[in-house]
Image (cartoon, rainbow, N blue to C red):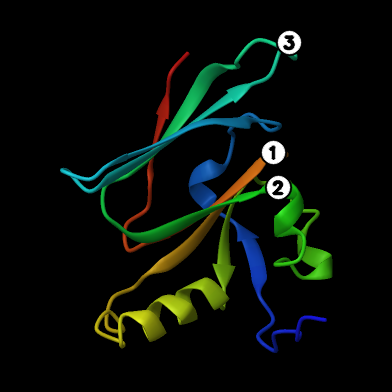
């Protein structure tokens, strides 16, 4: 059995996601290594065998790290009362992922205001560590 982590994470809806369509599905993750940009595309599923049309893209111009997990695997990371949030884009504080990042980078980024963004859909969950808010681009 896995040991329970003692840091209790709390989620709050990210204000920049206010008004976005809910029920979106993650359709693509693109990391441009040259520019340091991370682009997450999200769309609304219409048919089971047709890829969703992209409605929004979240663009992180500078990020420190990200991880992608299948939706079912994320339930173990969430605290019981935090999985019922309306928002698909949340801020997580305190963040176990951010603490792990600071340990791995030996604390060289401790003076930067790094936020833990969680982009959750029914199929995947992407956690992004970034010091700047993502840009929301509407594609439709």
Q: Could you tell me which residue is drawn at 66 percent across and 75 percent down? A: 9
Point out residue 136 in the picture as x, y percentages from the top left corner: 41, 36
Q: CA distance from mark 1 to mark 2?
A: 5 Å
Q: Position of residue 53 (x, y in %)?
A: 55, 14
Q: Is residue 29 left or right of residue 90?
A: left
Mark 3 = which residue? Answer: 47
Marks 1/2 in contact by CB < 8 Å: the verdict is yes
| Labelled pair 3, 2 in contact (Cβ < 8 Å) | no
Mark 2 Cα within 10 Å, few/some/many (few <14, many 20+)? some
User: Is 46 on the left or on the right of 127, as rendered?
Assistant: right
Looking at the rendered image, the quarter that the N terminus falls into is: bottom right
Q: Looking at the image, can residue 95 be seen?
A: no
Upstream in sequence: badge 1 or badge 2: 2
Q: Which residue is mark 2?
A: 71
| Cα–Cα gap, marks 1 and 3 | 15 Å
Foreground residue among 80 and 73: 73
What secondary structure is found at the residue carrying circle 3? loop
Describe the element under mark 2 as helix, strand or loop: helix
Label whose residue precedes the other's in the sequence (3 or 2): 3
Q: Give the residue displayed 48% in from the left and 27% down from the top.
A: 56
* Of the pair 81 and 65, the residue shown nearer to us: 65
Q: Which residue is mark 1?
A: 123
């Amino acid at each position: 059995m896995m040991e329970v982590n003692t840091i209790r994470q709390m989620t709050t809806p990210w204000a920049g996601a206010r008004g976005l369509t809910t029920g979106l599905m993650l359709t693509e993750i693109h990391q441009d290594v040259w520019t340091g940009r991370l682009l997450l595309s999200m769309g609304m599923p219409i048919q089971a065998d047709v890829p969703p049309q992209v409605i929004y893209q979240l663009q992180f111009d500078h990020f420190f790290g990200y991880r992608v997990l299948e939706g079912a695997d994320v339930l173990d990371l969430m605290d019981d009362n935090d999985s019922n949030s309306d928002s698909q884009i949340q801020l997580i504080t305190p963040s176990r992922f951010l603490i792990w990042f600071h340990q791995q980078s030996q604390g060289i980024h401790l003076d930067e205001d790094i936020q833990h963004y969680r982009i959750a859909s029914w199929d995947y969950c992407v956690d992004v560590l970034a010091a700047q808010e993502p840009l929301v681009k509407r594609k439709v």
